[in-house]
Image (spheres, rainbow, N blue to C red):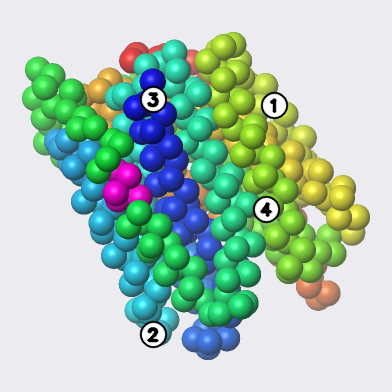
Amino acid sequence: MKNEKLLLWTLAAINFIHIVDFMILMPLGPQLMRLFDISPREFGLLVSSYTFSAGISSFFGAFFLDRFDRKKILLWVYVGFAISTLGCALSPSYPVLLIARVLSGVFGGLTSALILAIIGDVIPDTRRGRAMGLVMAAFSIASVLGVPMGLFLASISDWHTPFYILTILSVSSLAMIVRFIPNITEHLDRDSVRPHPLAVISKVTSDPNQMKAITLSVMMMLGQFMIIPFLSAYTVANVGFTEMQLTYIYMAGGAFTIFTSPWVGKLSDKHGKLKIFVIFMTLNLIPIAIITNLGVTPIPLVLLASTMFFVTSNGRYVPAAALITGTARPENRGSFLSFNSAVQQLSTGVASLVAGFIIAEDADGHLLNYNVVGYLAIFFSIICIPLAARIKIVS
């Protein structure tokens, strides 16, 4: 049990670092646009390059992840991640930084799939919800530290500093991988033939249960990432926040989910993953409806709604991740989760793109049709409930 906890804390640390690596660029936008003399569109490319490269790497990762010892492949992937993060820190220009972000996304996408595969291999289903809760709490900590610390560190030094710190943390986590994660080769010992790369996709798409899990992932991403990319802009333009006050939203939401994420994991193991998923998915509809219809509103009320959004969003993801992971057997779990991670990343990009077409700006700078985006997000979220109910755990 002690070794299991050390393994989970190691995975949580890895998860935290690569999530912060993605999130930390966003609050640096004003400084990077000024220093590199780039447009908002070019900065948007800088942000989205991570997501799309992560999606592509996860897709191709489905072809080879199950052919190796989980520990060895994780070490190689994370060495690449540390080097690309150092590349971000050393970038002297926009083109170089863009290339470094693409490489960071490549290794970050593979890391996400490997984390879930290791949990699925090592942790039995009876404790998998709690394990997911602990590891996914890293997202909450990243929300608390990533955005406000990125702003703070950049303001007292420059934008390079956060990436130098992430590089140091990445090297430290490599030592944790070596020490606390065992060699995981059981999936290699099973009497199964390793399929051709195209057969990997065929195997996933021909499995109705796994396709339900992937469809659930898509609907969940559409239900959330039509809202999240424009939350900051809408809160500033329509609700009356300053850019610095935006950090309150991430700090409050992240602080609460640090504690609620493990709690939700325990509830999932005790009362059933589907039941807890349905409860939190239903509760999540309330803050979506509120925050996409806000006008000028006092800060405490906005924080109440946004914190409920973070807590319920995280609360529905913890049992969903356990359900989705449980649809794959050990011998093809890495391939399936890598494929699923790729679909999630691409769905995130599609959600943002669709929302961008719907949302408009009036002459006064206010964003229009965010409520329409909210209604669509609610629609996709509701679809998730019957989808989750039809998923069967096989391992």
**First in sequence: mark 2 or mark 1?**
2
Q: CA distance from mark 4 to mark 1?
A: 22 Å
**First in sequence: mark 2 or mark 3?**
3
Say which residue label 2 marks. 92
**First in sequence: mark 3 or mark 1?**
3
Percent across and percent down for residue 156 are 61, 78
Amino acid marked by disc 2: Pro
Magenta stretch: includes residue 175:
yes
- For residue 283, say whether it is visible: yes
> Which quadrant holds the N terminus?
top left
Find the magenta span and give its range.
173-177
- Circle 4 crowding by C-alpha within 10 Å: few under 14, some 14–19, many from 20: many
Say which residue label 4 marks. 250
> Looking at the image, is mark 2 or mark 1 nearer the viewer?
2
Say which residue label 3 marks. 2
Check contact, mark 2 vs mark 1: CB within 8 A: no
Q: CA distance from mark 4 to mark 2?
A: 29 Å
- Circle 3 crowding by C-alpha within 10 Å: few under 14, some 14–19, many from 20: few
